[in-house]
Image (cartoon, grey):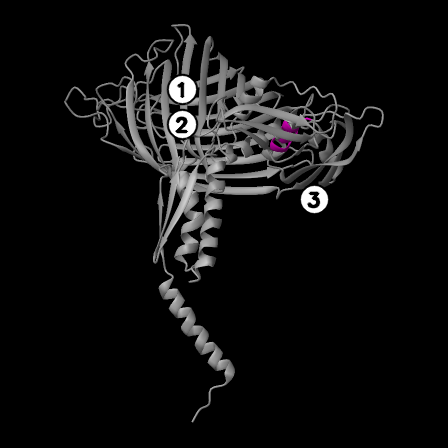
Amino acid sequence: MLSITPIQKFIKVWLIIYLHTSILSAHSVVIEGISDPQIRRLVRSQVVSPWEQNRFSGDEVTDHFRLNNDISEIKLILHSFGYFDAEVSADFDHDKVTFKIKLNERYRINNITLIYEDNMDYDIGLTVDQLFDLVDIKRSSYTDTQHLAEAAEKIDKYLGQQGFAFVHMHQPELKIDKAEKKISVTYPIKLNGKTIIDKTILKIKSKKDPELLKPFIRNRITWRDNETYDSKKIEETKTGLMDTGIFALVDVFLTDHKIDPETPNISHANIALSIEEAPLRDASIGLKYGNSEKIGVMASWTHYNVDGKGSRFGTLFDISGHTKIGRVKYSNFDVFRKAQELASQVFYLKENVATYDVSKVGAESILWQNFGTHFKVGAGICGEQSRTLDKVNFDEKSTSNPPTEKVKFKAIGIPFGINFDSTDTFLDPQSGVRGSSMVTPYFGNLKNITILSGKVAAYFPLKQNTFKNSVVIAVYSKIGSIIRNTNNVIPRDKLFFAGGANSVRGYGNQKLGQFNKNKKPLGGESVFEIGIEPRYRLTENVGIVVFLEGGNVYSSKMPKPFHDMLFGYGFGVRYYTPLGPLRFDLAFPMKRRKLPDGKHMDSRFNIYISVGQAF
């Protein structure tokens, strides 16, 4: 016969008690009086889960103590949303707990004040109204603790841009006026002196001689020694250096901070940049597809920091059913002065589409001068030689109308360009504005011909969550014009065409504008396009978009915005990767045009698969 030890008896009794209390103490929780989903969710997370997980002890005194503690926690949550007069009670009946909440009047923001603990005479440059605008809070509006915490971050960022590098923000203090139902918020701040940058120290980790890279890096630093600290310039410098593709890490930190003994409201520090070089070579390959453009392959290879001074060498190949492009590029920096890029390339293009067949070789060199971090201006020289066959009047189904010989064109151009880009990323911009324009007068066979083109896109984030900006509204517009002597012949490939993967997607590649009886698009001497695309990110990796786009090409020298425009619409799916979004778009034309024989010129829909956003 087996004997039971005292320890076994204890375990047996404990299991019986535990199972008994677990069965008796499984409770449901009801919350009454809250309709706001955010507040209700926070309250439920505070009280529902613990009670449903068998928190009742069975002892009346202990359980009432826990209920009172939950009531206090609920009131704190309600206070954080401005409900300082909220009433909370709880009823407990065996297997059910009911929290009854009466919110009463919500308090509004009356005033915001900054108090500087340093007792120094600082000129912050903020009026009371400007302070409200800075923190994005309106007088007599409702607020919550999350908004107040975000306001503290905005104040801290602003002070950093005013020269205060060592700001210490304390928790905001609330003064509650129960008679007026208003709140006054005070942010206690210790500024620790406006900071002067004494010197900048570079710590470079590179496979090549780090001394070669120092001029390149210093030319991209947006602050100077012995000037006031500005956190905005710090971020601009970090972004600018990372965008070169040369560096894997750019870390900026302050060292040797000390208060000026003669002027206590001034401090001094050094800025140290710790920079680590990235792998100097990268390669990429991708596929794209459009039912009017067929499948295509894109491949690139880039070698960064070729000479140890920041230069870049790369190749690009883009091959599809109608087009073959090969480019070799070389960029040299700070040629004559800082913030310059001399971008040179040679290229070969072979394009055989419905309206023309062209083979072209050319070279281009443009010197770009940056002004700040977003704006640059460039000028240079380009040359090309092409052989073009115009197939507009050729009926491919007829043997009695063969194509003529290819026409040779030689031309020298003087391109002038302006670029502006304040977007956060290239392939998937979340905010900012991007614009470019180019004017190129040509000489040679194309004498007295000048081609002008421009495009602008803007991105407006509407909603933020853990997936960056979960809703972004993207808009764009494109315009172009060819100015020429009416006696000069323009090669067909120099005309403007529209429609396709990065144009009005509802219409096939080059399908906008007039066309002849053989379904050949004629192109135009001017172009105008517009588009809007709301982008919604469902998860970290998946998003959806809808889009509406319109445009046309015109035979006139100047475009006619919103005149005879063709519109397309559609939707798409985005799969976000570290290299950029993969996109799948399904687009439809609003108007399917007909040929004289009654057949449709335009497909019912168009499919596009590629990398990166459409614009």
Q: Position of residue 269 (x, y in %)?
A: 77, 32
| 3 vs 2, front mark | 2
Disc 2 target residue? 473
Q: Which region is colored magenta?
A: 230-239
Mark 3 or mark 1: whose residue is earlier in sequence: 3
Give amino acid for label 2.
Answer: Ile
Of residues 56 and 296, which is closer to you in this image?
56
Q: Position of residue 420 (x, y in %)?
A: 53, 21
Of residues 189 and 542, which is closer to you in this image?
189
Give amino acid for label 1.
Answer: Ser
Dot label at residue 477: 1
Q: Residue at x 21, y 26 (%)?
A: 398
Give amino acid for label 3.
Answer: Lys
289 in magenta: no
Mark 1 falls on what kind of element? Answer: strand
Of residues 295 and 139, which is closer to you in this image?
139
* Main SS, magenta residues: helix
